[in-house]
Image (cartoon, rainbow, N blue to C red):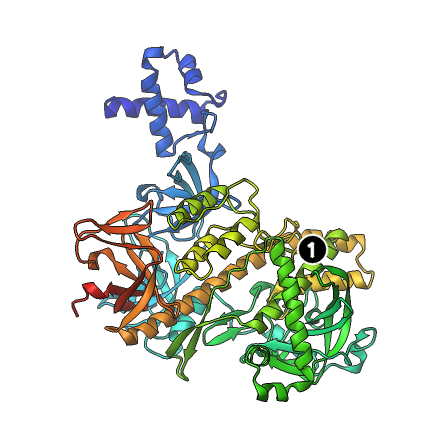
Amino acid sequence: MNPELLKERKENIADLILNNEFYVPMKTKEIAILLNIPKENRHELQEVLDSLVSDGTIGVSKKGKYMKPDNLSVTGVFESTKKGFGFVCVPDQEDDIFIKSGDTKGAFYHDKVRVLVTCEKQKGRRREGKVIEIVSHEIKRIVGTYQDNKNYGFVIPDNAKITYDIFIQKQKSLGAVNGSKVVVEITNYGGNDRNPEGKVVEVIGHIDDPGTDIMSIIRTYDLPVEFPEKVNEALKSIPYEVEEKDKSGRVDLRNVMMVTIDGEDSKDLDDAVSLTKEGDLYHLGVHIADVSYYVTEGSSLDKEALKRGTSVYLVDRVIPMIPHQLSNGICSLNQGVDRLALSCIMDINDKGVIVNHRICETLINVDRRMTYTSVKKILVDNDENEIEKYRELVAMFRLMEECAGVLRKKRFSRGSIDFDFPETKIILDDKGHTIDIKPYDRNVATRIIEEFMLAANETVAEDYFWQEMPFLYRTHENPDPEKMTKLSTFINNFGYSIRISDEMHPKELQKLLERIEGTDEESLISRLTLRSMKKARYTTDCVGHFGLAARYYCHFTSPIRRYPDLQIHRIIKECIHGKMSQKRVEHYNKILPDVAVSTSSTERRADEAERDTDKLKMVEYMSEHIGETFEGVISGVTSWGIYVELPNTVEGMVSVNDMRGFYVFDENHYEMINEFMGKSYKLGQKVKVVVTDTDKILRTIDFVFLEDYDG
């Protein structure tokens, strides 16, 4: 059909579907009958309809009925890429929508947009769509590096997903100079043919100044650092020590031997543990700081805590959810002082079954502040000095190891999955520069505390589920079968398999992790397995926790650093005191869905900020080792290059352009092959690489295989 005729017919059909008040959604055949189009010409009608759908002018339902695009559009968040195309993530939909570069309507990164799906998901291809409306610009400010020009300036965003530089008029630069890290307020979002414009509202510092790099990430994620004046005023009425009037009406556990076990650097100690044994029954006490006693609902402290949602742990600082006067003071379970707590006291039999429990308000006094290192020295290293130093506690620590082992065995018997990844420990000097990076492995002491906290979280969640109280649960839904199928296909390359089903049991993945334990590919397959699962989140419905194979689960044990824990403490205490009236039930039913969404979001924000600071410091560290050789493991193979992870958890990439010879990517086996040279690189393979370059802005590390290095 010639372009002029196609254009004319498109206008006529669009007018029918969009403007005719009597039109109802119809299939191609029905439209043909309505317009008296003979059978032999229906292919031309189909061409017109397909073109209108492709343009986004009209929409087509899954049943093949054509209608106004508004009736079929979905609203989501636009994620841009360097290459111009993007993706729209729609809430509560697992798969995102691919948007071609010409179909973005000039959408900016993180814009809320309406999208018309123009092509449904097919085998091997994701859904495709076209942006038909920019609903709102969600990004108001960005952080980047200022570059000065004679008559104007521009800012290169730190976020590589923002593909435009921001144009800055000279008089709106706030005195920024070349290399200044700045915060820019966007005044015009531009479009496909011109850059966004903005004005500098804060000069953070020069890119080379100590601390500027981390503060730039803090500003990027809009993390609140300083507490508002209202919060500081509220602190004046909170005592530094527990007052006598606040101790009454509580179960007095000050004579019960208990300890805190944390990292050496921890200052906000919100959980203490106690343990005794009578016959076959362990009596485990998990005692949690009663933060809700001081941070009351609706107060300025509470509003700020909800806004923050969680404490954020960056490499050089902690941004707390509640002020240090509380988190490191009266709410911290410090050694040798009276503290208010909410305790979950459990009776556990020798099979790991919690046969009885009690949740109550308590008054405690911690005997010793222990570290993971000290407890490991006692239990694993049999360190004589450490044993002598804590001789009155050694028997309890050995009992704790025994009880944790029983709980762990019970948890594993039901299929709980344990991803034992080494965490990254980044060591800085007094100027904030990275001087070492190493894996921070869990030990016997961290596992003891993990098991005890898991037991308390499950116990509390089950209790309040059966009480049918409004509550916040920590849920982890079953994985998507399609992602599990992809994982299954991948692990077949290594000789492993998993059974796929719509209602997959976590035991299947647990067995896989057991089979790969100790192999070269263990870390790789474990990470891919984790990525194939859904993200845990907070919900008001108790749908269980897949990864833990737990029917009931919540977060109860960290109210100093997580708002959901603080929120459910209030609910628990109202129930304990018999104050959960119908009015209060309605109140919680009203507010909890928003709290679940908000805290899930702030948790993701904190995770991303923490990851970005780790990456930044890794790049900084490796920039001091350019030209040096390291041994690592191939952690990813793509058509553009090969990712290699070093033993210290640093990951970099070997570009396909830096590989000598002609390599072809085999997407079925995640392998890069050079048939002429008889060489290949595949996942899990040990290799030697040389560091050739780093980029602090993009946070990338470039490697070259040692055999290809010309330096």
Q: Which of 350 and 359 is in front in this view?
A: 350
Question: How far across and down, in percent of the image, does residue 365 sit?
Answer: 72, 81
Question: How far across and down, in percent of the image, does residue 342 sit?
Answer: 73, 69
Q: Is residue 447 above or below residue 9?
A: below
Residue visible at 65% across and 70% down? 402
Q: Which of 42 and 651 is in front in this view?
A: 651
Q: Is residue 92 visible?
A: yes
Question: How far across and down, in percent of the image, does residue 552 sit?
Answer: 67, 54
Quadrant housing residue 250:
bottom right
Q: Mark 1 points at which residue?
A: 471
Residue visible at 50% across and 71% down? 313
Task: For the C terminus, give its image quadrant.
Answer: bottom left
Q: Is residue 226 above or below residue 593?
A: below
> Along the horizontal axis of the image, is 491 left or right of 450?
left
Circle 1 SS class = loop
Q: Can residue 175 be seen in this view?
A: no
The amino acid on which the numbered mark 1 sits, given as a three-letter code, is: Phe
Question: How far across and down, in percent of the image, does residue 25 sit?
Answer: 48, 23
Q: Is residue 280 above or below residue 98?
A: below
Q: Is residue 248 above or below residue 147?
A: below
Quadrant housing residue 559:
bottom right
Task: For the N terminus, give its image quadrant.
Answer: top left
Q: Which of 547 and 142 is in front in this view?
A: 547
Residue visible at 50% across and 56% down? 514
